[in-house]
C-alpha cells in the first residue's frame, strides 16, 4: 500500500513539474508593445493570460523595450524583455516569478538564420546587403556572394533587409530552430526610390560602387561605366600619356590590381583607359581597396579593384541592348532550367576604324565578350563557369602615324560556393588568365632617308591559380576568415624586332622567346571582432612564399583595421597594412612611351614590400550630406625602374641588368563630399599628395619626385534632375602636371646608351564632360537615351612622345601635348526588358 501511495505521489509531482516547466513554452499572440520593462511585463501577462509577479524595484525602468506583433512563446518574450537585467525567472504554482539576481539574465537559446539575400524575380545574389533585427539592433551584412548568417534568440523577430538600388523590406520570422532562408528584395527602378545604408559601422575601408548608381559616370562612348567611376574617388588618378592607366596614391600602374570575378586582368581597359573592360549591363558591383587591405588580398600594393558580375536570371529571360555612334553592346540572361541553371551573355563591339577615325584622332577598334553559367545543385551548393575575351587595336593614323598598339585579355574561371553549416561559407576558385601586348614605335626619318625604323615589341603571360576562402560566423561579435592560394605564372617579357614596318603577326616573335616561370603560395587568417555596438577591430596576417630561378622568398604581412562609431552620424577608422607584390611592372621613366615589362621578383629584383598607415573619418547625416576624409603615409622597398642610360626600346635576355631597384615613399590627404538635394546631387573629390623615388644611381642617391607625382587632383560632378525622367550632369577634372623626364636621344644600336635630360614639371590639365539622359517606359520595356560631349574644353589630357632621327642614327626625342581624345559628341540608345 505504501509503495502504491508513493507511486501516485511521484506521478502527481512529475505531472505538476511538467505543467510548470511548460509555462515558458506556451504560445500566444503578442500585440506590438513598447515601453519600460514594467509596462511590457504587464502587457505580456494580459496577452498570455499567465500570472507574472515581480518587484518593480528589481528592474531598470529606464530601458525602453520594443516587442513586435505576432505569435511567440512566453519564454522568448520574457528573455527579450529582461535581456541584460539582473534577475532570474522562476516558475511556481502555475505562475511566473521574477526575482533579483547577482548577474544578468542568461540569454535565451539562440538559433542561426542563414542563406542568401537575392533580387526578387531573378534570384540574383546581392552583395553587401544589410540585415538588421529591429528591436535589438543586431546587424549582419551579406558577403560578396550574397551569403549571410545571423544568430538570434528563439522567438519572433522582425528583420529589416536593405540594399542600395533595391526597396527595403521587413521580414518577420518565428525562430525555434536553425533555419536556411533566402531573403528577397524587389528592385527599385526609379532613382528616387533607391535605398542607401545608414551610418553602419565600417567592416573595412573598401569603397563600394554598383551598377545601380546610374549616371555617376558616362564614358566617352556614352555608356554608364561604374568601373570607370573609380577615377572619381580621391587618391585615384589617370596617367596623362597615351597609356591611360589607373594611378593610386602615387604608385605606378602595375601596383593596381584588377580582379574580374576573382581572376586577375593584366590589361584592364579599352581605348587607353577611357572605357572599362566590361559593359555595365553585366556588372553587379565594384569595390576598391586602397585605404585598407583585408588579409585575403595581395598582388597590388597600391590598390585592388574587385569587379563582380551577375550570375544570370534564374526565373525569366531578360536583357539589355545599347547602340551608339561608336559601339554596340548587349546582355542576355535567363534560365536554362528555371530556378536551377541560368546563363548570362554579354558582348560589346566598336563600330570600326571609320567611326572612330574622325572623333578620336586615331583608328581604334575593340571588342569584348563575357559569358557566365550558374547551376544550383541544392540550397548549399552552387557552381559557376565564366569566360571573358577582350581585344584592342590602336593605330595613330592622323597626327601621329608612328604608334601602333594591340592587346588582349583571355580569362576562364570555375567557382564553387558551398554552405558547409549554419555559420560557415566556403568559396573555391580555379582561374586561368592570359594576356598579349604588342607595341610598335616608328621613327620619323629626315628627307635624306627613304625608310623608317620600327621597334616592334611583344610580351605575353599566363597565370594559373587555385584558391579557397572560408568565412566562419562564430557569434554576432566574432567572425573568422581564412584560406589559401597556389599560383603559377609564365611571363614572356618583351621580344624586340627592328624592321621597316609594323609586325602585327604575333607568331613572328616566337623564336627566341624567353619564359620567366614562377610559383607562389599564400595563406591568411583574420578575425572580425565587434566590441559593443560601436567598436570593431579586424586583426589579420597574410603569409606569402614564392620560388623563381633558384630564388626563394617568404614574408609574414600583418594587417589591422579598426573603426569606432562616435554617434549616429560620425565614425573614425584606422588601418595598418604590410603588403607585398611578387610581379614587377617595370615602367618607362619617359612620358608617352608605353614601354612596360612584367618581371617576377628575383635575387636582383626582390619583390616589392609596402607599409602603409591610414586614418579616416566619415560623416553621414540625415540631410543627405556624406563626407569622408583620409590621411595616409606609405613606404615601399624594391621599387623598380629602367636605369638612367638604358635603351628602353630594345629588349634582350639581359633585361634584368637594365633595371634598378630603390625606395619609394608617399603621403597625402584625401577628401570626398557628396551632397543630395531634392533634384540636385554634387560629388566633390580632392587629393593633395606627394610621391617620391630614391635610387642610388640617380641624382647621387637623393630623393626625387616620382614620374606620377601630382600635387593636386580634383573632380567635380554636378547632377540635376529637372523632371522625373531626365538627368543632366557636368563632370570636371583638374590636375597639376607630372614630373617629366626625357632622354636626350635614343640610339638605333641597342648597346649604345645616352644620358637623361633635366626633368621638369608638366603643364596643368583639365577636362570638362557634359551628359544628358532621358528614360521612359513602354509596358515592361525601359528605354534610355543618352547624349553628351566628351572633352568640351579641348584641353589636352593625353600626350605622346615623338622620336626623330639624325644622320648619325641617333633619335632625338620631343614631347608635345598631342591630344588623343579631342572634343567628341556621343549619342546612345539603351533598351532593357
Image (cartoon, rainbow, N blue to C red):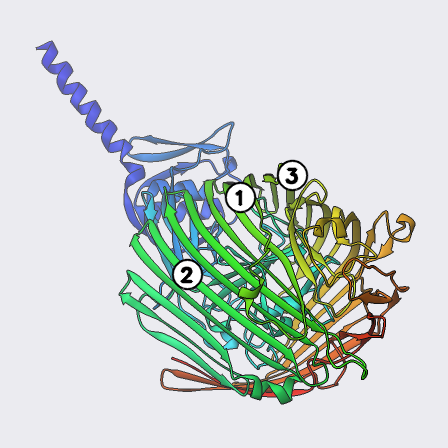
Disc ID at residue 61:
1
Q: Is residue 214 left or right of residue 317?
A: right
- State if disc 3 and disc 1 touch (CB < 8 Å): no
The vertical placement of 673 against 255, above or below, is: below
Tell which circle, 2 or 1, labels the residue nearer the N-terminal end.
1
Spot the residue most to the top.
2
Q: Quadrant of the N terminus?
A: top left
Q: Is residue 116 left or right of residue 237?
A: left
- State if disc 3 and disc 2 touch (CB < 8 Å): no
Q: Of 543 and 588, which appears nearest the observer?
A: 588
Residue 741: x %, y % from top left: 84, 64
Residue at 55% from the left image edge and 70% from the top image edge:
505
Question: Dot 1 surroundings within 10 Å: few (below 14), some, or many (20 or more)?
Answer: some
Q: Quadrant of the C terminus?
A: bottom left
| Residue corresponding to mark 2 | 386
Residue 163: x %, y % from top left: 48, 63
Spot the residue most to the left.
1
Tell which circle, 2 or 3, labels the residue nearer the N-terminal end.
2
Tell me the SS state at disc 2.
strand
Residue 74: x %, y % from top left: 34, 42
Amino acid at each position: 500500500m505504501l509503495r502504491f501511495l508513493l507511486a501516485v505521489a511521484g506521478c502527481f509531482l512529475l505531472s505538476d513539474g511538467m505543467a510548470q516547466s511548460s509555462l515558458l513554452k506556451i504560445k500566444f499572440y503578442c500585440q506590438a508593445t513598447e515601453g519600460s520593462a514594467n509596462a511590457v511585463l504587464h502587457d505580456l501577462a494580459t496577452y498570455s493570460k499567465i500570472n507574472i509577479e515581480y518587484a518593480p524595484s528589481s528592474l531598470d525602468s529606464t530601458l525602453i523595450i520594443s516587442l513586435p506583433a505576432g505569435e511567440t512563446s512566453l519564454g522568448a518574450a520574457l528573455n527579450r524583455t529582461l535581456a541584460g537585467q539582473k534577475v532570474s525567472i522562476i516558475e511556481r504554482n502555475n505562475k511566473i516569478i521574477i526575482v533579483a539576481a547577482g548577474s544578468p539574465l542568461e540569454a535565451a537559446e539562440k538559433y542561426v538564420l542563414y542563406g542568401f539575400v537575392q533580387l526578387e524575380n531573378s534570384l540574383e545574389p546581392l552583395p553587401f546587403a544589410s540585415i538588421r533585427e529591429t528591436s535589438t539592433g543586431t546587424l549582419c551584412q551579406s558577403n560578396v556572394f550574397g551569403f549571410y548568417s545571423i544568430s538570434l534568440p528563439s522567438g519572433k523577430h522582425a528583420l529589416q533587409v536593405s540594399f542600395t538600388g533595391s526597396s527595403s523590406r521587413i521580414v518577420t520570422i518565428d525562430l525555434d530552430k536553425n533555419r536556411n532562408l533566402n531573403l528577397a528584395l524587389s528592385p527599385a527602378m526609379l532613382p528616387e526610390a533607391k535605398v542607401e545604408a545608414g551610418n553602419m559601422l565600417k567592416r573595412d575601408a573598401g569603397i563600394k560602387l554598383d551598377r545601380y548608381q546610374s549616371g555617376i559616370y558616362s564614358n566617352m562612348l556614352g555608356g554608364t561605366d561604374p568601373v570607370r567611376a573609380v577615377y572619381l574617388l580621391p587618391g585615384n588618378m589617370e596617367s596623362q600619356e597615351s597609356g591611360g592607366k589607373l594611378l593610386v596614391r602615387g604608385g605606378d600602374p602595375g601596383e593596381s590590381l584588377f580582379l574580374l570575378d576573382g581572376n586577375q586582368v593584366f590589361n584592364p581597359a579599352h581605348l587607353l583607359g577611357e572605357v572599362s573592360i566590361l559593359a555595365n549591363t553585366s556588372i553587379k558591383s565594384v569595390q576598391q581597396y586602397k585605404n585598407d587591405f583585408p588579409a585575403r588580398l595581395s598582388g597590388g600594393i597600391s590598390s585592388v579593384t574587385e569587379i563582380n558580375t551577375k550570375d544570370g536570371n534564374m526565373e525569366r529571360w531578360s536583357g539589355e541592348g545599347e547602340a551608339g555612334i561608336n559601339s554596340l553592346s548587349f546582355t542576355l540572361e535567363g534560365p536554362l532550367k528555371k530556378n536551377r541553371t541560368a546563363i548570362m551573355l554579354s558582348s560589346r563591339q566598336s563600330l570600326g576604324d571609320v567611326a572612330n577615325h574622325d572623333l578620336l584622332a586615331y583608328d581604334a577598334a575593340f571588342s569584348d565578350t563575357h559569358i557566365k553559367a550558374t547551376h544550383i545543385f541544392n540550397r548549399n551548393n552552387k557552381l559557376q563557369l565564366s569566360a571573358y575575351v577582350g581585344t584592342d587595336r590602336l593605330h595613330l593614323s592622323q597626327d601621329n602615324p608612328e604608334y601602333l598598339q594591340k592587346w588582349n585579355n583571355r580569362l576562364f574561371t570555375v567557382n564553387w560556393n558551398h554552405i558547409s553549416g549554419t555559420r560557415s561559407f566556403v568559396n573555391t576558385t580555379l582561374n586561368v588568365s592570359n594576356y598579349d601586348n604588342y607595341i610598335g614605335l616608328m621613327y620619323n626619318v629626315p628627307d635624306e632617308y627613304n625608310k623608317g625604323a620600327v621597334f616592334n615589341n611583344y610580351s605575353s603571360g599566363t597565370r594559373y591559380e587555385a584558391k579557397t576562402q572560408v568565412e566562419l560566423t562564430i557569434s554576432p561579435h566574432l567572425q573568422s576568415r581564412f584560406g589559401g592560394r597556389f599560383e603559377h605564372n609564365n611571363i614572356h617579357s618583351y621580344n624586340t624586332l627592328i624592321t621597316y614596318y609594323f609586325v602585327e603577326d604575333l607568331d613572328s616573335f616566337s623564336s627566341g622567346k624567353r619564359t620567366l616561370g614562377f610559383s607562389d603560395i599564400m595563406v591568411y587568417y583574420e578575425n572580425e571582432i565587434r566590441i559593443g555596438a560601436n567598436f570593431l577591430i579586424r586583426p589579420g596576417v597574410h603569409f606569402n612564399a614564392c620560388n623563381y630561378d633558384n630564388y626563394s622568398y617568404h614574408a609574414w604581412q600583418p594587417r589591422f583595421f579598426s573603426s569606432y562609431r562616435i554617434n549616429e552620424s560620425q565614425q573614425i577608422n584606422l588601418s595598418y597594412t604590410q603588403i607585398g607584390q611578387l610581379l614587377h611592372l617595370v615602367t618607362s621613366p619617359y612620358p608617352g612611351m608605353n614601354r612596360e615589362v612584367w618581371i617576377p621578383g628575383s635575387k636582383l629584383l626582390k619583390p616589392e614590400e609596402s607599409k602603409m598607415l591610414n586614418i579616416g573619418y566619415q560623416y553621414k547625416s540625415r540631410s543627405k550630406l556624406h563626407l569622408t576624409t583620409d590621411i595616409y603615409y606609405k613606404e615601399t622597398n624594391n621599387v623598380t625602374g629602367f636605369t638612367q642610360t638604358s635603351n628602353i626600346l630594345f629588349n634582350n635576355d639581359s633585361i634584368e641588368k637594365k633595371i634598378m631597384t630603390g625606395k619609394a615613399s608617399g603621403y597625402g590627404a584625401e577628401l570626398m563630399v557628396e551632397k543630395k538635394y531634392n533634384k540636385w546631387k554634387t560629388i566633390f573629390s580632392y587629393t593633395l599628395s606627394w610621391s617620391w623615388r630614391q635610387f642610388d644611381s640617380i641624382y647621387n642617391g637623393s630623393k626625387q619626385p616620382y614620374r606620377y607625382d601630382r600635387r593636386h587632383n580634383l573632380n567635380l560632378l554636378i547632377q540635376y534632375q529637372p523632371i522625373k525622367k531626365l538627368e543632366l550632369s557636368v563632370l570636371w577634372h583638374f590636375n597639376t602636371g607630372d614630373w617629366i623626364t626625357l632622354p636626350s636621344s635614343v640610339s638605333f644600336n641597342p648597346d649604345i646608351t645616352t644620358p637623361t635630360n633635366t626633368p621638369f614639371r608638366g603643364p596643368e590639365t583639365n577636362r570638362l564632360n557634359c551628359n544628358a539622359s532621358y528614360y521612359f517606359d513602354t509596358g515592361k520595356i525601359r528605354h534610355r537615351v543618352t547624349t553628351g560631349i566628351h572633352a568640351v574644353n579641348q584641353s589636352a589630357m593625353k600626350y605622346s612622345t615623338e622620336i626623330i632621327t639624325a644622320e648619325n642614327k641617333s633619335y632625338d626625342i620631343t614631347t608635345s601635348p598631342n591630344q588623343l581624345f579631342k572634343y567628341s559628341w556621343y549619342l546612345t540608345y539603351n533598351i532593357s526588358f
